[in-house]
């Protein structure tokens, strides 16, 4: 059990590195790609990479007080008493991935972008409600991640439409 606690402390220190906050939303792009390709294996590997990405970066030498305060509020939420509200918020994460996979599996670009944007803005809203003023620390990483994902979808759709053969002109 001590090994597990040591691992959690090691990972928690690395979670304070703001670079991981910018990297995590980028995993949505390969997840979308694999959903579009209908690859369960690709989506599963992407989710595993996403789950481990919080501790890919070294622990920062110094931590922004807003980041530290927000992460403490997040930790209290996760470790605090179980409630219906907490269960609802926990379920929004797998629901996000199910809806995202479904949208791109079915080639519904508009619904996919809507899911991405609602999730990003929902994360910011939840962070501010739960973390107070410190919740605003997630705003820039969340919005940048949302814009990059939206742009990737836009470019992907343009690429796919450019590849489609055009019908020959009759005449």
Image: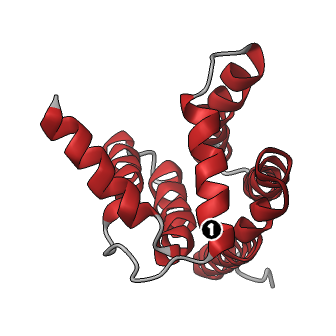
Q: Quadrant of the C terminus?
A: bottom right
Q: Mark 1 points at which residue?
A: 67
Q: Tell me which residue sits at (73%, 50%) in the image.
A: 108
Image quarter hosting the N terminus: top left
Q: Can residue 20 be seen in this view?
A: yes
**Chosen colour scheme:** secondary structure
On screen, residue 116 versus residue 80, left or right, reads right
How far across and down, in percent of the image, does residue 155 sit?
66, 81
Give SS at disc 1.
helix
Q: Residues within 10 Å of mark 1 (few under 14, many from 20)?
A: some
Q: Which of 46 and 2 is in front in this view?
A: 2
In the rendered view, would you say 163 is above or below 93?
below
Vertical comparison of 74 with 162: above or below:
above
Compared with 171, 13 (above or below) is above
**Direction from residue 86 to residue 16 in the image, left or right:** left
Residue at position x 63%, y 19% in the image:
81
Residue 107 image point, x, y percent: 66, 51
Relative to residue 151, is residue 132 depicted above or below?
above
Choose between 28 and 85: the one closer to the eye: 85
Image position, residue 130 (x, y; %) = 78, 44
Quadrant of res 146: bottom right
Whether residue 142 is visible: no
Q: Is 100 on the left or on the right of 34, as rendered?
A: right
Q: Which residue is drawn at 76% across and 73% down?
A: 143
Q: Which of 2 and 151 is in front in this view?
A: 2
């Amino acid at each position: 059990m001590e090994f597990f606690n040591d691992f959690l402390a090691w990972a928690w220190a690395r979670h304070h590195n703001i670079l991981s906050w910018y990297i995590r939303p980028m995993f949505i792009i390969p997840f979308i790609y694999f959903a579009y390709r209908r690859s369960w294996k690709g989506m599963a590997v992407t989710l595993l990479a996403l789950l481990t990405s919080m501790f890919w970066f070294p622990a920062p030498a110094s931590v922004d007080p807003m980041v530290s305060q927000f992460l403490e509020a997040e930790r209290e939420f996760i470790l605090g008493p179980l409630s219906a509200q907490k269960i609802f918020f926990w379920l929004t994460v797998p629901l996000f991935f199910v809806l995202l996979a479904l949208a791109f599996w079915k080639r519904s670009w508009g619904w996919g972008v809507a899911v991405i944007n609602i999730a990003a803005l929902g994360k910011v809203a939840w962070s501010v409600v739960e973390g107070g003023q410190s919740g605003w620390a997630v705003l820039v990483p969340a919005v940048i991640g949302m814009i990059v994902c939206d742009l990737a979808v836009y470019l992907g759709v343009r690429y796919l439409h450019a590849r489609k053969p055009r019908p020959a002109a009759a005449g």
